[in-house]
Amino acid sequence: MKRYFWICLYSVLCILHSLSASAEIKYIFYFIGDGMGTNQVLSAEMYRSAIQGEPLGRVQTLMTTFPYSGHASTYSKSNGITDSAAAGTCLATGSKTNNGILGLDADGNRLTTIAEDLKAQGWGIGIMTTVAIDHATPAAFYAHVEKRSDYYKIGKQLCASGFDFFGGAGFHHPQGKHDNKSTNLYRLAEQNGYTIVRSPEEARQSIIPSFSGEAAAHSINKLILVQPCDTGMNHGSNLPYAIDRKEGDLTLTQIVSTAIPFLNARYERFFMMVEGGMIDYACHADDAATAIGETWDMNDAMQVAYDFYLAHPDETLILVTADHETGGLALGNSDYTLHLDLLQNQKCSSWVLSDRFTQLFKETSKPQWTDVKRLYRENLGFWDTVKISDDEEDDLKDLYEKACEGKGKDAKNMYKTINSLGEAGVALLNKKAHIGWTTRAHSAHAVPIFAIGPNAELFSGWHDNSDIVPILKKALGN
């Protein structure tokens, strides 16, 4: 009898596996958290749990509720620590390359991306991000250049890609960095059949009447959605951080919410790469509160995809991973305690705080210490809800006096130079939350993988990032 039970159970499992394997995947959401290691995900969950009064880790991100998970190593062809170009190329093609290279192998041979492959098979393709649409990770899915910094060349390849939807901050150098005679990339995109819109509302009202239940406007086949001209600290380079967001700022959730009906109205099958690119930016600044906000912000965009999955569970695959970890984030820096709840006192990113200190010193060459303390109190909660010792205040005051003498040493990372007073304040808050950082660059940490949908179990276990595209092709039956 017992043997008969196990035979029946095995038969049922085989049937279920066969049904899963035979499911036709028609919709793919490929989420990439740039710089998002395991501790970035865990800190986001533990922080939200702490401020909501729940047991640590009880408040989960959507990705950690997915039924299948694993990890991936991220080394590049040239080094144990990858950059986003090599990692993005690997996540887009399944092939390792050297740091700094996009869409080519180490010998300069062109690689075919999963997006290009699916486009050739008749799929709709959407590429979206919280940073520039010609930045390394999104560019890895359509560009083929020896230098990731060749933004104008990358932008020209975007315009010629034929992909259906792009969304993000815009182009780094739309006119070309050193060539005023070059064609503006927005104009070039329009010449290649793209319609440029700067808000989801503009997309809904002018391009996609199907949002309101009417017939789709098929005359508009290719769309680029970018942020309004007057938003973002570095226009064209990034959307505002979630912690700094103001009304009217473009968000990743809005981009994904625009892309899904746009692609779904035009194609029976579509592929979307969605990058939470500002997680990386925050971790380059060793700014835990801002990184946590960006992780939850990508989670919000993921919820839109998950709602679509719930309506099409047998046809939709959602895959989440990262190109690398940034910052060497450590949860714990002294004893057996964490105080992540203290991070809720941070009201803006280190970028914005830095600019506020810079502005203060522009207004008067030697502001009063009370003015500096006011900025710390308003933006980080110091002396009120975050207790500051006399020694800690003396250290901050020493930096203030050096700044007054013009001797302040600003902190530089890949994306921004941060005022010494702003950097020190965020670093102190991180220390009090018992968060540690080993670097302002990338690390070789493994990154997580989460998956749900048909054949998602294939992504379980330990992998290298070069395995992900081959597994995805296997899931598709290729």
Image (tube, rainbow, N blue to C red):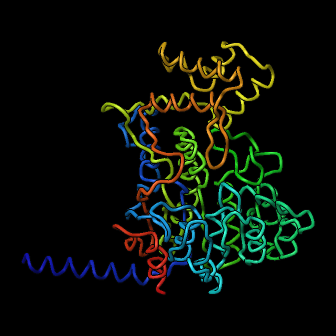
In the displayed structure image, the side of residue 433 where residue 396 appears, left or right: right
Q: In this view, does 405 lie above or below 327?
A: above
Q: In which quarter of the image is residue 157?
A: bottom right
Vertical position of residue 411 compared to residue 369: above or below: below
Say which residue appears at 21% left-offset and 79% top-offset: 10
Q: Where is residue 29 in the image (x, y as percent from the top left)?
A: 55, 67
Outermost residue on the left side: it is 1
Task: Report the front residue among 54 and 39.
Answer: 39
Picture layout, residue 413 above or below residue 314:
above
Question: Residue 152: percent from the left, percent from the top?
Answer: 78, 66
Answer whether residue 259 is visible to the viewer in this image.
Answer: yes
Q: In this view, does 86 lie to the left or right of 19?
A: right
Res. 260 visible in picture: no
Q: Give whichever of 200, 447 is nearer the camera.
A: 447
Question: Which percent across, then down, holds residue 311?
Answer: 54, 67
Can you say whether 460 is above or below 277 in the image?
Answer: below
Residue appearing at x 81%, y 51% in the figure: 228
Q: Residue at x 37, y 37 (%)?
A: 332
Q: Which residue is drawn at 61% across and 66% down?
A: 100
- If the image is split into quadrants, where does the N terminus sit? bottom left
| Residue nearest the viewer, comparing 200 with 349 | 349
Q: Quadrant of residue 224?
A: bottom right
Counting from the top left corner in percent of width and height, residue 406 is at 71, 25
Tell me which corner region of the image, top left, top right, bottom left or bottom right, holds residue 161: bottom right
